[in-house]
Each structure stands twice: as C-alpha cells, then as structure tokens.
Image: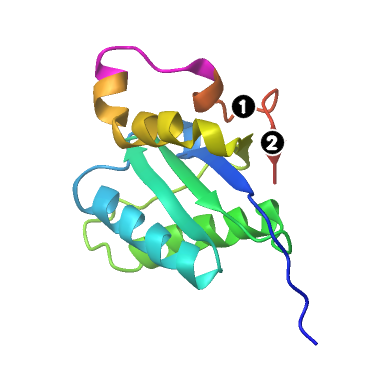
Amino acid sequence: MSVRVFSQLYYHFIWTTKNRQPQLTGYLHNCVLEVIAKNVKDQGGRLIALNAMPDHVHLLVSLSPTMSPSFFIGKVKGASSYNCNKSVDDGKLIYWQNGFGVLTVREGDLDILINYIENQQLIHEQRKHIELFEKQEPDAVIGE
C-alpha cells in the first residue's frame, strides 16, 4: 500500500557569490540558471521562479515533505558551480558564499514573490528591493 501525502511547501532560497563578487554575468548567468532549473527537477522539486543578479540567486520551489531544504539547496548550489565551472574556458569561475537564506511562503503570497523574482533586474535598478527577500547573512533564516 502506498502512502499519500498532501503538502503545500513553498521555499524561497537566496544565496550569494563569494564576497558578493559580480560573477553571474553573460555565459555564467545563463549557465547557472539552466543548471539550477534542471537540478531542481532532478532533485524532485517543482520550480516556480528563478532569477539571478550578478552577485546572488533567488529560487522559489515547492518541495515534498520528505525533502530536507538544507540537503536540497546544497545539491542545487553544488551542481550549479560544478557544472558551470567545468565548462568555462576564460578562467572566470563561480564561487558561492557558505550558507543560504530560506523563507517559507504562503500559497496566497506566491504571485507577489514570483513577480519579485522575475523582475529582479528592474527592482534592483530602482532600488525597490525588499530587505527580507534579500537576506543571506547569518542573522537571517539560515541553513548550511
């Protein structure tokens, strides 16, 4: 007999490049997003929104209750740097800062957060970012 579980678990992950160096540009920006999207699916997550600025990444996913958020994001971060770094020929490699920020999200707030993530470039250009949505520092909700 199989066990059926209903869940609505939405996670907003934020992580940064080492020392907030603006490494995610051009090829690396596209590579990171492609590898993350593929790895989310490979890990059993459901991708809802994904975007990156030159120094940080926003990822909104739905995970099963059996998936540890820390384990999941460790795999996603590791796969993105490993796969993109092995295909770089100009010596510009991605290094992630240790740790990450993670917030749980109510289903009713998904549209707001999807809009926020999809419009990162404009939001940062206009300096209208939401501090809580940008936290990755140790005083934020952090995992390793």
Along the viewing direction, whichever of 60 and 121 lies nearer the viewer: 60
Disc on the earlier residue, 1 or 2:
1
Q: Can residue 125 be seen in this view?
A: yes
Q: Percent from the top left, x then y, of residue 3?
A: 78, 76
Above or below for 37 versus 13:
below
Q: Percent from the top left, x then y, of residue 12?
A: 54, 40
Above or below for 3 versus 59:
below
Indicate the amino acid at tag 2: Ile
Which stretch did the figure color magenta?
124-131
Q: Label 2 near label 1: C-beta < 8 Å?
A: yes
Indicate the amino acid at tag 1: Glu
Q: Percent from the top left, x then y, of residue 112?
A: 42, 28
Within the magenta stretch, is there residue 130? yes
Q: How far apart are marks 1 and 2 (CA)?
A: 8 Å
Q: Residue at x 42, y 40 (%)?
A: 57
Q: Is residue 21 visible?
A: no
- Quadrant showing the N terminus: bottom right
Q: Name the residue under label 1.
A: 137
40 vs 2, left or right, is left
Along the viewing direction, whichever of 33 and 89 lies nearer the viewer: 33
Q: Percent from the top left, x then y, of residue 72?
A: 62, 59
1 vs 120, left or right, is right
The quarter of the displayed image where residue 71 is located: bottom right
Predominant SS along the magenta part: loop
Q: Mark 2 points at which residue?
A: 142
Residue 73: give its label: none
Q: Looking at the image, which residue sits at the far top?
A: 127
